[in-house]
Image (cartoon, rainbow, N blue to C red):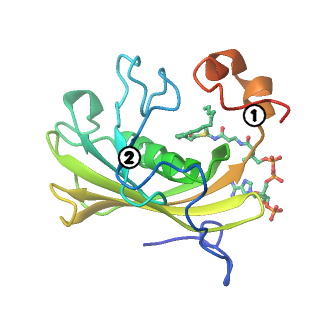
């Protein structure tokens, strides 16, 4: 895919191994926040993505494009597809058990995606150096080995939980994440 140097790891950047405490291979990944647009079950119009990790380092999910996701008539909106990619990318970096946010997200739209299409999404990490994690994802039509419709590459930056306290609603997060402390 077309990727800028800002979403490609510098040469020699190591791909991290599975972390102690990561969900075991085959686990379903829960939602990180019930009102998240990407994965929250309480979000009325969200994408409701449910993912699994086959190997504790990558993430797989399916997303069926619905009528609410249209841009052109009966075709998926590119921004909705980018949101789905952002979500699985975020889930994949969270397997390394630290809080990260998206700093840069690049998306290549390879095929038009009609309403009713089920995309098989996969996201993985190409390397982490310092606070910077380099990630990639793809969405394939109809099957895990179907044609690629969307590709994404991203730079996520590690933050502290203070980021969410200062800029968002930490109480809402900690209500669902007793495993995180603001001042660890
Ligand atoms: C939500 C609660 C979760 C709690 C529990 C955690 C569990 C999570 C579980 C599961 C997650 C699943 C799913 C989530 C999915 C969705 C994720 C999103 O959509 S996140 C929202 C959108 N993103 C933002 O709102 C970021 C806004 N931006 C910022 O806050 C800052 O700009 C930030 C933190 C990204 C960087 O700011 P600085 O001041 O901390 O650090 P500086 O020094 O600027 O950057 C660090 C390094 O990164 C590079 N960098 C930063 N931004 C860059 C960019 N846009 N392009 C290229 N490089 C960039 C810089 O050049 C620097 O690199 P050098 O260390 O000098 O080598």
Left or right: 101, with 154 as reference point: right
- The disc at residue 103 is none
Residue positioned 57% across, 47% down in the render? 94
Residue 11: x and y in percent read: 66, 84
Residue in the foreground of this view, choosing between 76 and 64: 64
Asked which secondary structure carries label 1, the reply is: helix
Closer to us: mark 2 or mark 1?
Answer: 2
Query: Within 8 Å of ligand 1, the CB of disc 2?
Result: no
N-terminal label among 2 and 1:
2
Residue positioned 66% across, 31% down in the render? 179
Query: Within 8 Å of ligand 1, the CB of disc 1?
Result: yes
Q: Do we see residue 152 in this rendering? A: no
- The disc at residue 161 is 1
Residue 180's quadrant in the figure? top right
Q: Do we see residue 102 in this rendering? A: yes
Above/below status of 55 relative to 8: above
Above/below status of 141 relative to 52: below
Residue 85: x and y in percent read: 42, 49
Residue 120: x and y in percent read: 26, 53
Whole-Å distance between the Cαs marked 2 and 1?
25 Å
Mark 2 — residue?
27
Residue in the foreground of this view, choosing between 171 and 9: 171
**Count of marks placed on residues:** 2
Residue positioned 53% across, 47% down in the render? 90
Residue 46: x and y in percent read: 37, 26
Left or right: 77, with 42 as reference point: left
Pointer 1 local density, CA inside 10 Å: few below 14, some 14–19, many at least 20? some
Considering the image in quadrants, where does the N terminus appear?
bottom left
Left or right: 88, with 125 as reference point: left
Residue in the foreground of this view, choosing between 30 and 71: 30
């Amino acid at each position: 895919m077309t990727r800028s140097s800002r979403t490609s790891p510098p040469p020699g950047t190591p791909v991290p191994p599975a972390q102690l405490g990561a969900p075991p291979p085959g686990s379903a990944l829960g939602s990180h926040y019930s009102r998240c647009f990407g994965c929250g079950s309480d979000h009325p119009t969200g994408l409701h993505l449910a993912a699994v990790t086959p190997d504790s380092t990558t993430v797989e999910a399916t997303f069926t494009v619905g009528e609410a996701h249209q841009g052109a008539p009966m075709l998926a909106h590119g921004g909705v597809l980018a949101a789905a990619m952002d979500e699985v990318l975020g889930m994949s970096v969270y397997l390394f058990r630290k809080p990260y946010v998206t700093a840069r997200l690049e998306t290549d739209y390879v095929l038009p995606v009609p309403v009713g299409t089920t995309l098989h999404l996969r996201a993985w990490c190409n390397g982490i150096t310092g606070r910077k994690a380099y990630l990639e994802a793809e969405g394939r039509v109809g099957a895990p080995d179907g044609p690629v419709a969307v590709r994404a590459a991203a730079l996520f930056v590690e933050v502290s939980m203070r980021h969410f306290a200062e800029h968002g609603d930490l109480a809402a997060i900690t209500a669902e994440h007793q495993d995180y402390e603001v001042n660890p």
